[in-house]
Image: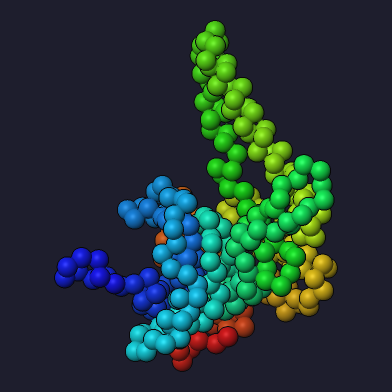
Amino acid sequence: MQVADGIAISSPELLFAELAAHLHPVELLVLGYEMCGTYSLDAADPFNGPVSYGLKPLTSAKRIREFVAQARGIHGIAVARKVAAYLADNAWSPAEALIAAVLCLPVDYLGYDLGALVLNPRVGKGCALPGARDSRVPDIVMSGTSTGINYDGKEHLDLDSLVRAAVDVGMNPGAVQNQVALQQAMRAVRSKIVDDIRRNRELALSGYSVLPMVMEDLYVRGGMDAMAALLISAIEQRDKRDLSRQRRHLGKRALSDARYRMMLSLLPGNHPRHVKVGRFIQGFKVDETSWEPEERVITW
């Protein structure tokens, strides 16, 4: 990709292919979601720096898949092709992308093997509830099902503004502007809570089972496993799918621990980065060394 006279950089599609030799599949898929999404991590501090939202995607899942299908002579290209099969457009946040990555990837890539998904689809048009919105947007819906997840992160409810306004009132209770600011902050938080409740019931009336998920589910050991178990149960009950194989993998401690360490390494906070999680075949750990994209040892 030419960016100036005499200066060229890898296109997003080529970068995805090249990084397959250096990143674990979870990391690679999360990066792909960012490329095809509407957010961008901070270049100087991608883990704890500010995130930019509402951006134009750099590329699309279709373009990356087409590129890696035709590319030759790139180390790790076979893995890039496999991971690209799980790409989806329209990721809105880093946490959403990480959740999506582990839900869809195969177990030997530390995923839950639930297959393809759709990010932020607009669904539920024509909801019959009086006063309902024309449509709603769940964060993640598993392809071919009516089941998904809504993730509410730390910033979902602006409690920091509410606390600051309350402190200001406490410091200067006679200031009218402080009282007004506190009332506005309270109304904003309450409005968001009410909208969440209405969203959930409108989605339910439209035939969707969308499970709520919070930040703590990502940071607590076993939290993501519990969400995956709930999602598997919901898909089996509502969509009549047999996910017994995926359910069996939930009980494998080494796999769960490796997945948790990998996810934690990609989340904000003071965590180890670029962790070594070993190699898995059929969900069982077979090698303590770090993951390497050599085709001869990749088993799906």
- Which residue is at the front of the view, 291 or 106? 106
User: How far across and down, in percent of the image, does residue 237 sit?
Assistant: 83, 68
Compared to residue 267, the image places residue 288 above or below, namely: below
Quarter-wise, where is residue 253 in the image? bottom right
Which residue is found at the position 57% from the left and 16% from the top?
A: 179
Extreme bottom residue here?
A: 296
Q: In the picture provided, is 40 more to the left or to the right than 87?
A: left
Which residue is found at the position 43% from the left and 68% from the top?
A: 59
Compared to residue 184, the image places residue 82 above or below, namely: below
Quarter-wise, where is residue 256 in the image? bottom right
Q: In the picture provided, is 61 more to the left or to the right than 222?
A: left
- The quadrant of the rendering that contains the N terminus is bottom left
Compared to residue 250, the image places residue 197 above or below, namely: above
Q: How many marks?
A: 0
Which residue is found at the position 53% from the left and 30% from the top?
A: 161
User: How far across and down, in percent of the image, does residue 133 sit?
Assistant: 71, 47
